[in-house]
Amino acid sequence: MKPRTLSIIAGVSYLIIFFAAIFANFFVLESILKDPLNAIQQNHMMVRFGILAFMFTVVFDVVVAWALYELYKTHPLSNLSTYFRMMHAAIMGVAIFALPVALEYNNGQEILKQVEIFNIIWLIGLFFFGIHLILLGKIIGKPKIIAFFLIIAGIMYMIDTAAHFMLPDYEVYGSIFLALVAIPGIIGEMSFAIWLLVKGGKENHEQRVKE
C-alpha cells in the first residue's frame, strides 16, 4: 500500500477516535458521574451508544497502530512503538467490559463503582499509550513541533497515571494534571492527524524516516 494511502488511513482513524472519545467521555461518562441512576435508567440508549463509541476507539486504535507501523516500519523504534499502542488498545478493550455491567444495576453507588473500574483499567492503558507517544515523537522526527508535543504528551500521560496511584490526594491536583495531559495531547495528536491527512506519505517520506 502506498505511503500516502497509509497516511490518510491513519489520519482519518485518528479523527474518528477523537470524535468518538469526545462523545463517550464528555456526553456519556460525565452524565453517568453527574446522575448515575438517571443516566442508566432514563438515558440508557445514550449510554449504550457511548459504549459503542469506546469500542470504535479501540478498533481504530488498532488501525492507527497498523498504519503507522507500515508507514514508518524502516525506523528501528517502529516495532516497539506499535507494541505499546497495541497494549493500550487491548487494555482499553478490557476496561470497556465494566460499562455494560453498569447497565444491570439500579443502585447509583454500584454504577459508579463500575465506572471507577473502567477508569482505573483505562489509566493503566494510558501509561503504555504515553510510552507509544514518546516513541512516535522520536520516530516521526519532523515536523519538530509536532514531535515535541507528542513526546511531552506521552510523558504527561505516564506522570498522570503514576500520580493517580501514588498521590492519596490526587483529586486536589486533578484539574492541573488534566490540563497538563490534555493541552499537549490535543495539540500533538490533532496536529499530527491533520499533518497525516495533508502532507503525510508524500514523495519525501522515505528520506524523512531515515533522518
Image (cartoon, helix red, strand yellow):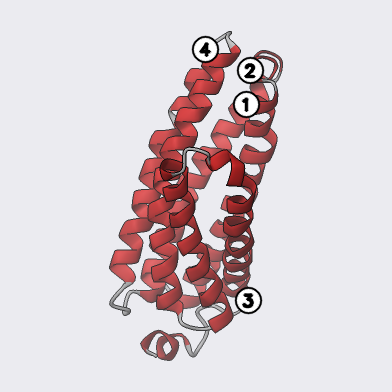
Is 61 in front, or is 84?
A: 84
The answer to whether marks 1 and 3 mark residues whose Cβ atoms lie closer than 8 Å is no
Q: Amino acid at mark 1?
A: Val
In which quadrant will I find the N terminus? Answer: bottom left
Q: Position of residue 153 (x, y in %)?
A: 52, 63
C-alpha span from label 4 to label 2: 9 Å
> What label sits on residue 104 in the rendered view?
4
> What label sits on residue 198 in the rendered view?
3
- Name the front one of labels 3 and 4: 4
C-alpha span from label 1 to label 3: 34 Å
C-alpha span from label 3 to label 4: 45 Å
According to the picture, the residue beneath numbered tag 2 turns out to be 40
Mark before the other along the chain sequence, 1 or 3: 1
The residue drawn where x is 51% and y is 76% is 147
C-alpha span from label 2 to label 3: 41 Å
Mark before the other along the chain sequence, 4 or 2: 2
Q: Amino acid at mark 2?
A: Ile
- Name the front one of labels 2 and 3: 2
Q: Is residue 154 visible?
A: yes
Q: Position of residue 107 (x, y in %)?
A: 57, 9
Seen in the picture, residue 198 relative to 134 is either above or below; the reply is: below
Is 193 left or right of 73, judged from the image as shown? right
Mark before the other along the chain sequence, 1 or 4: 1
